[in-house]
Amino acid sequence: LLPGAQTDIEPIRYEDGRVRYLDQRLLPGVERYVETADWRDVAGAIGTLAVRGAPLIGIAAAYGLALAARSGEMHEAARGLTSTRPTAVNLRWAIDRVVAASGGAADQVATVEAEALRLHQEQIESDERMSELGAGLLPDRATVLTHCNTGSLATGGIGTALGVIKTAHRQGKIARVLVDETRPLLQGSRLTARELERVGVRFDVIVDAAAAGIIAAGGVDAIVVGADRIAANGDTANKVGTYGLALAARAHDVPFYVVAPVSTIDAGTRTRAEITIEHRDEDEVLAFGGTRVATARASALNPAFDVTPHELVTAIVTERRVLRAPFVDAIASVVRPAAVAS
Ligand code: MRU
């Protein structure tokens, strides 16, 4: 584990020209690590969601570039890795950063490796800071609802939204967590449940469709989610189902917090209209655990993400500070001026 990583889970590691990653598709039943020296395998792992979660796919892509630097394929790899998933901006951000660091370097391999490792280390530190800031927003004895998986498996550190929950739990503030199972790939019941079990947090898995009713009945004190891309105005793309949670939260006066590092903010995306939503294979919806459950002729729509308008967001917790409306100004204050679109 990199220094300071407060987790017993190591979803990815780079060592001696090899990437070792945990195949998250097999969890919780099977803990299988895959080792490779080929950036194409890393791209494949991102595309199939063996490696997933916005910050982690950025880190994986950075390590993929470190492998590519060794085989002299940086440019091809940068293109190939960028095209694996379109919504999470951390992917493009990490690739741009590592490519920029490599430019003109005398020893390109050493420079690229160092930058990729630095990026991973920075994520671990950002997670700690976000988790502290976010935990401070939760009331005592809170019942918190979360969606998808935003923990160690998604970041390589303590996590973003799940890091907030783990930290609040250490502070004795969490009564219970409601974990959306997160259809269709069950990141909630497979991955978030596994992480919460390991730290001893009391939780219940709910079907995504139960959330609105439980919120309406007064059973939730706060909703805490991650993000794949935050536009310059605060509009937030996250795992499909997040927008519905935000609508229910607003209708029933429950705070809705987004927790994400500054690297998830894309100042070049002005509003939700410019966010590309990934559409995935319809079999993810039509089959369950490898067995087809829909009728033989059924087709499916499978958007992997949706966008929550900034008006529904109570606050965005970053490692720099907690951002509140007006989000355009708050976001501009934490994003480096060079990154802001003209
Ligand atoms: O398709 P996934 O599993 O990569 O989607 C993950 C999410 O939507 C997370 O909420 C987001 O990436 C934030 S992870 C800290």
Image (spheres, rainbow, N blue to C red):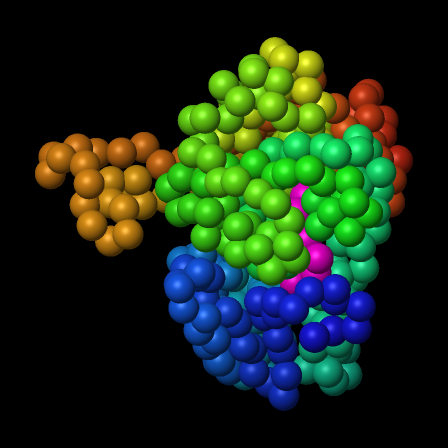
In the image, the segment drawn in magenta is 154-163
Report the quarter where the C terminus lies. top right
Q: Position of residue 111 (x, y in %)?
A: 75, 78
The residue under the point 56% across, 36% down is: 178
Residue 225 position by quadrant = top right
Q: Is residue 112 visible?
A: no
Q: Position of residue 254 (x, y in %)?
A: 68, 20
Q: Position of residue 120 (x, y in %)?
A: 71, 65
The residue under the point 57% across, 21% down is: 215
The residue under the point 60% across, 85% down is: 17
Q: Position of residue 129 (x, y in %)?
A: 83, 51
In front of the other: 145 or 327: 145
Q: Is residue 315 visible?
A: yes
Q: Measured along the vertical axis of the image, is residue 58 above or below residue 212?
A: below
In front of the other: 265 or 224: 224
Left or right relative to 266: residue 75: left
Residue extending farthest left: 296
Left or right relative to 4: residue 28: left
Q: Is residue 214 magenta?
A: no
How many numbered marks are there? 0
Report the quarter where the N terminus lies. bottom right
Left or right relative to 270: residue 248: left
Q: Is residue 158 magenta?
A: yes
Q: Measured along the vertical axis of the image, is residue 24 above or below residue 187?
A: below
Left or right relative to 224: residue 121: right
Residue extending farthest bottom: 16
Q: Measured along the vertical axis of the image, is residue 123 above or below residue 65?
A: above
Residue 308 position by quadrant = top right
The residue under the point 80% across, 68% down is: 4
